[in-house]
Amino acid sequence: MAERIYLDWNATAPLRAEAREAMLGAMDMLGNPSSVHGEGRAARALIERARAQVAAAVGCKPVEVVFTSGATEAASVLAGLPGGAGVFVDDTAHDALWTHLNVGSVRSDGAGNTLAMGLANNETGVISPLPEKVDGRWPYGSTVGADWLLLDVTQAIGRMAFSFAWSGADFAVLSAHKLGGPKGVGALILREGLDISPLSIGGGQEMGRRAGTENLIGIAGFGVAAQAAVRDLADGAWEPVASLRDEMESYIAAQAPDTIFAGSHMPRLPNTSYMVTPGWKGETQVMVMDLAGYAVSAGSACSSGKVRPSRVLQAMGFDDLASASAIRVSIGPTTKREDVMQFADAWIAAYRKFNARAA
């Protein structure tokens, strides 16, 4: 069987070698991080080192980092904000944020509400401009403002410049596996001084914000991966990725003139291409390419198997037919040019067969 080609970095990035090494080292640590003996203190020191690494990558204080099982759990902070107020969710936000839409009663004056939005869209890669406060509140729509701002920076960290401190946000959520760390660990970034209900109830771990013995192995990998991700960004590792993505899009556009690259006229992450071919179902394209040996997706991995038009594309003005006819190709610094161009050739061959059947 020919070697498969992985082009689904936005679903999960390959595990970094340095993260794997850190995790293997953590497996040999005996102590519980909450224990006060030497073994426990060593485990605690590892967690605090990782906390500092993640804080440096996100541009926040270590005390503002709360380790979780991932961005989805971190987003559950929306259900426990002061006042039990509602949530305004950006049209193109990830489902993890939409889950908390209007979790409480929205007051008519909008007070106590939270604006939740993604900084970089997981499907299109489009980068949203950061809002600015108006009269001390975060704007949403023409008349409503919110007291708090939550940013989903899951796709952004390590792929574009970002600092929680200068963003002005109150919360941010992210996952380790999007930047080359392990699956099953992430973080809530909580602006110092804000009070929230615990994400889980039990012991006093994570400064009383999230009970349960910490995932020592995952956190160790997370910290090292975050550190490596921002190093790669600073070293310009993503600039060739953007060039390769653009080359692939130009090549495909020349052969498939009815294919639209959603968001290509807007600021995007350097690695993401969302290809819309109206009438050719996205899930069909994914299956065809999978059988040919290429791993791509029809959108968010969290929504795979849900056969429905892309809410993100609908929010961008695409009709239902086009919104159900997209695939996402997402690559990274270790992706080879020959792999991407082989995918393009395979996709074009399948596209021609689709057109021949539809004629």
Image: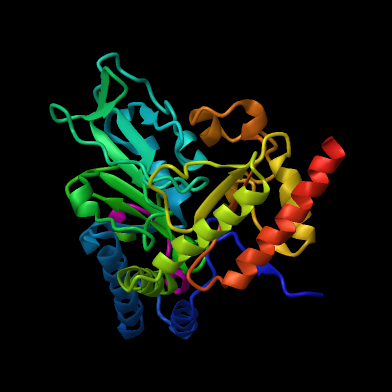
Q: Is residue 197 visible?
A: no
Question: Which of 208/230 is in front?
Answer: 230
Write the residue at 56% across / 47% down: 274
Say whether residue 275 is left or right of residue 171: right
Q: Quadrant of the C terminus?
A: top right
Whether residue 101 is situated above or below residue 246 in the rendered picture: above
Q: Residue furthest front?
A: 254
Whether residue 73 is situated above or below residue 40 in the rendered picture: above
Q: Position of residue 349 (x, y in %)?
A: 77, 55
* Image quadrant where residue 87 sits: top left
Write the residue at 86% across / 40% down: 357
Write the residue at 49% across / 81% down: 17
* Image quadrant where residue 66 sits: bottom left
Q: Position of residue 264 (x, y in %)?
A: 47, 45
Write the residue at 23% across / 63% down: 62
Colour pattern of the rendering = rainbow
Question: Which of 253/198 is in front?
Answer: 253
Magenta segment, which residues?
207-218
Q: Is residue 20 visible?
A: yes
Q: Is residue 216 magenta-colored?
A: yes
Q: Position of residue 34 (x, y in %)?
A: 34, 70
Say whether residue 327 is left or right of residue 104: right
Q: Quadrant of the N terminus?
A: bottom right
Whether residue 145 is situated above or below residue 242 in the rendered picture: above
Whether residue 322 is situated above or below residue 232 in the rendered picture: above
Q: Is residue 176 magenta-colored?
A: no
Say whether residue 67 is left or right of residue 341: left
Q: Position of residue 69 (x, y in %)?
A: 47, 57
